[in-house]
Image (spheres, rainbow, N blue to C red):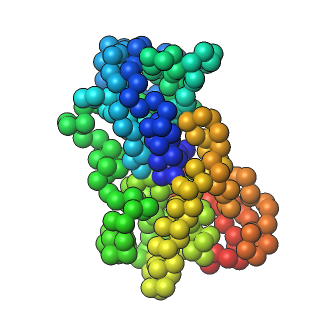
Amino acid sequence: MIEIPESITIAKQLNDTVKGKKIIEAEAGHTQHSFAFYHEDPAGYANQMKGKRIGMAAGIGSMIEIELEEKNFVIGDGTNIRYYEPGRKLPERYQTRLTLEDGSSLICTVAMYGSMFLIDPEVYDNFYYLVGKEKPLPVTGDFDYEYFKELREEVSGKNSVKEFLATKQRIPGLGNGVLQDILLEAGLHPKRKLNTLMEQDWRRMYEAIKGILSKMLAAGGRNTEKDLFDNPGGYQTLLSKKTVGGPCPYCGNLIQKASYLGGTIYFCPYCQE
Ligand SMILES: [Zn+2]
């Protein structure tokens, strides 16, 4: 699932590759998928998208938004978007296709579940979309320590660190993926209760959010996810399915995993109290 580093990376790649190009043909719902979600009838996408020029793309949390003149095309975190250069054979199975005037295509596929919403940004009021647009990203200056302290007021001391950081869209696009390395860097176990934290722990958590996400972004996303060109990101995850069972990069103890709050958490039993 893409999160902040990947949505921003892919948006930048879209801006560098297809921005300004005109859509000559589009289709949605090409391959039937029970958990591919559209805004209104996908059969109507073709006419609405055809002839539109691709505008600015932006990463909004775990979503990617692409301007298509008066409409916006918004892709959710379970939807993969890939660029196909002119002449390259398209896959047989996909959900949405935008073919551009130079013969290139953007292909969206859904793995488990995912959304591809063609919306009117003036009136669209989906909760995830709105908070993704409104709340400051941790990689920006608006996400300062004062703002971080305000977020703390929304939770109780009985909540865990993972609940605080990666649920309720408190920080859109900070999900169970990027969470792992952030908490290793901060030296905090995902299940650690907030009422056991000292101010210095909060400060380390804040610095780790900023630091790790900046590193992931600078490297073009994580090595567990792929970009617009189907290449893995350059950030080597410390705690992920790729490293579980191996040594912790800091202390050498074996990295463990567990299920917690609807996702797999990875941790070092020694470095993360
Ligand atoms: Zn360790």
Count the marks: 0
Please state the horizontal and vertical placement of residue 135, each as a whole percent of the image.
32, 57
Task: Indicate the quadrant containing the C terminus: top left, top right, bottom left or bottom right.
Answer: bottom right
- Residue drawn at x 37%, y 75% as measured from the top left: 145
- Residue drawn at x 43%, y 58% as measured from the top left: 167
In the foreground, 4 or 201: 4
Task: Indicate the quadrant containing the N terminus: top left, top right, bottom left or bottom right.
Answer: top right
Query: Is residue 105 in view from this perspective?
Result: yes
- Residue drawn at x 32%, y 13% as measured from the top left: 47
In the foreground, 236 or 14: 14
Please state the horizontal and vertical placement of residue 182, each as a whole percent of the image.
56, 66
Q: Is residue 121 above or below residue 94?
A: below
Query: Is residue 7 in view from this perspective?
Result: no
- Residue drawn at x 51%, y 16% as measured from the top left: 103
Please state the horizontal and vertical placement of residue 261, each as a whole percent of the image.
53, 57
In the foreground, 272 or 227: 227
Is residue 67 toward the left or the right of residue 36 in the image? Answer: left
Q: Tell me where residue 265 sits by quadrant.
A: bottom right
Please state the horizontal and vertical placement of residue 48, each as a whole percent of the image.
30, 18
